[in-house]
Structure formats: C-alpha cells, structure tokens
Amino acid sequence: MISTQFDYVCAQTLDEALTLLAENEDAKILAGGHSLIPAMKLRLATPPLLIDIGRIPDLCYIREEGGQIRIGAMTSHYQIESSELLKNICPLLPECAGHIGDVQVRNKGTIGGSLAHSDPAGDWPAAAIALNAELVAASKDGERSISADDFFVDLMTTDLRPGEILREIRINKRGGRTGHAYVKMHHPASGFAVVGVAASITLDDNGGCKHTSIGITGISGKAYRAATVESALNGKAPDDQAIAGAAAHATEGVEINGDLFASEDYRRHLAVVYAKRAIALAIERAG
Ligand SMILES: Cc1cc2nc3c(=O)[nH]c(=O)nc-3n(C[C@H](O)[C@H](O)[C@H](O)COP(=O)(O)OP(=O)(O)OC[C@H]3O[C@@H](n4cnc5c(N)ncnc54)[C@H](O)[C@@H]3O)c2cc1C
C-alpha cells in the first residue's frame, strides 16, 4: 500500500522545526523514518505534513558534559553501536544498539525516533529506564526534562506534549564497580524484542549489590522498570539464589501481552529467564 498524500518540509534548524510543529498540530516529525514510513504505508498514520529533522546539524552527537553522557535525538543506532566513547563509559548503549534490526535499520533509525515512538517491543526504552535517562523535550515555550520512568506512558504513547520535539538524551555516568548488560530474545520474523532486559548494577566494596536498575521491554504495552527485582537484589550478596529469587519478580504488577508467537505464560517465563541472565552478566562485568 502507498501512503496518503502529504506535504514535506526539511527543517534547517530546531527553531524552524518547532515553529512548523506549533503551526501544524497534525504534522509529524520525520527522523529516520523506519517506524513512521511503514506506519504511513499501512495508513496507520496519515499526517498531512512531515517535518524532516534529519538535516538539523546540532541534533546528532555523542558527548560527555558535566558528568553526563549527552546524545542528540538524531543520533543513529549505528553511531551509538560504534562509539568508542560509549564503549568505554556506558557500554550498555552500544550493546543495546547492536541488537536493533539489521544494518540498514541501524544506519537510518535514531535513538530519539525510537524513544518517541515507544514501540512495546523496541529496545531503547528498556536501556533508557535501566540507565535512569533524562529525556529533554524542546518546544516554542522552552525545554523540560522528563525521566525515562515517566516518559513511557502507554502503548506507543509518551509524555511528549503537542508541539514538543525530543532533543537530547542525558545519562548520568555511574562510577565504582558498575556493570551493564542488555539481553534480548529476537522475534524470529521481525527481529524486535519478544523480551529484552537491560540491567545496570553497582557493587559495593564487599561485592554486595549497592544499586540495581532494571528495564524490561517486549512483555507489556510499554517498557517498564522492574522495581521489585531491584529491591529484592539491593543490599544482597549476588549469589545464584539471590539472583534467581530477584529475577522471579520480573513481571510483578505488569499486564503481560500474549500473541501467536508467545503466549502470556511463555512471556512471563522468558522475562524471568532473561532477567536472570542480564543480572548475572551485569554482575560479572562489574568485576
Ligand atoms: C525492518 C525493521 C526492523 C526493526 N527492528 C527493530 C528492533 O529490533 N528493535 C527496535 O527497537 N527497533 C526496530 N526497528 C525500529 C527502528 O529502530 C526505528 O528506527 C525506530 O523505532 C524509529 O526511529 P526513527 O528514527 O526511524 O523514527 P521515525 O520513524 O522517523 O519516527 C518514529 C515516530 O517518532 C516521532 N519522532 C521521531 N523523532 C522524534 C523526535 N526527536 N521528537 C519527537 N518525535 C519524534 C515521529 O513523528 C514518529 O511518530 C525496526 C524497524 C524496521 C523497519
């Protein structure tokens, strides 16, 4: 199928894009186009105007600033996957990026587009939650920062308001003995996450779990923080029993999706297994 007719503007600056968005409330931002264009071809989205933000130069960067990692919304999955800076200071991000789609998807798709799209089987939302990311939204009225925990509201629904563009992703660098991991069961047909678990774990001097942060995707209508898993592990020596006991809470309080490929029960089981794997790997990497 082909899309309905639409107008197209390639914005040269963020201000121009924000002005166009403020003046055209049904317009859609076009980033990498790897979710929006398929949706338009299926006529699930019929925007009268596309505002392309792909040529705005200051939306594509990865840098360290003020103790934080800052990533421009238009940074592609591949740029993150291949960033030496991120491999050194936040390896969860390149690891997560490497699990997304295929080379073509990773070359065009962007972290900002993926977070704003909030696909329930998308990979970035789990990583953003595990890393306690702050998402900076810009509008004609200024900017505001939204925590990843508050950003994902429902199925393909975020806290972004009309007229807002996701501009930047900020992540506080975590020091000490911190290990990260992203593990995923790829759907054999689409490559999206049947389940994806991101873990960021800091150990104390005695090897106990000081800070545990777990984001899970693929299971429910939106990615979520596995808060009960975190509290079950914090303060404990991370032996096999403690890890298994904590991972058993992976879907606590969550409405689980079932479909032809993975029933609700199977997804519940997968979430526990993959949470266990992610935790064990993050602890091993924390050293
Ligand atoms: C074959 C295929 C396989 C894929 N496999 C995976 C996978 O395994 N894992 C995964 O996570 N994803 C996967 N994807 C999705 C891919 O990662 C997309 O790139 C991503 O979901 C959307 O990013 P985009 O830059 O392409 O955004 P677009 O498609 O351009 O936009 C997506 C939505 O977000 C809005 N938007 C975009 N940028 C912004 C912004 N800065 N501020 C506000 N709103 C914005 C748009 O208006 C639109 O509604 C796959 C896609 C394809 C086609």
Image (cartoon, rainbow, N blue to C red):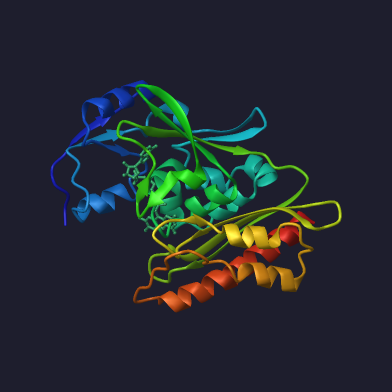
Q: Is residue 88 left or right of residue 63?
A: right
Vertical placement of residue 12 versus 283, above or below: above
Query: Residue 93 at x, y = what percent?
Result: 58, 48
Q: Is residue 96 left or right of residue 20?
A: right
Query: Residue 102 at x, y = what percent?
Result: 45, 58
Q: Is residue 287 visible?
A: yes
Residue at x 53% of width, y 52% of height = 97
Total tally of numbered discs in the picture:
0
Which one is in front, 281 or 81?
Answer: 281
Query: Residue 162 at x, y = what percent?
Result: 30, 34
* Residue sticking out furthest to the left: 5
Vertical placement of residue 198 versus 194, above or below: above
Q: Is residue 108 visible?
A: no
Residue at x 49% of width, y 56% of height = 224
Residue at x 42% of width, y 56% of height = 222
In the picture, which quadrant includes the N terminus?
bottom left
Vertical placement of residue 247 versus 139, above or below: below
Residue at x 42% of width, y 71% of height = 188
Q: Is residue 230 left or right of residue 209?
A: left
Which one is in front, 6 or 261?
Answer: 261
In the picture, which quadrant includes the C terminus?
bottom right
Query: Residue 184 at x, y = what percent?
Result: 53, 64
Vertical placement of residue 189 versus 153, above or below: below
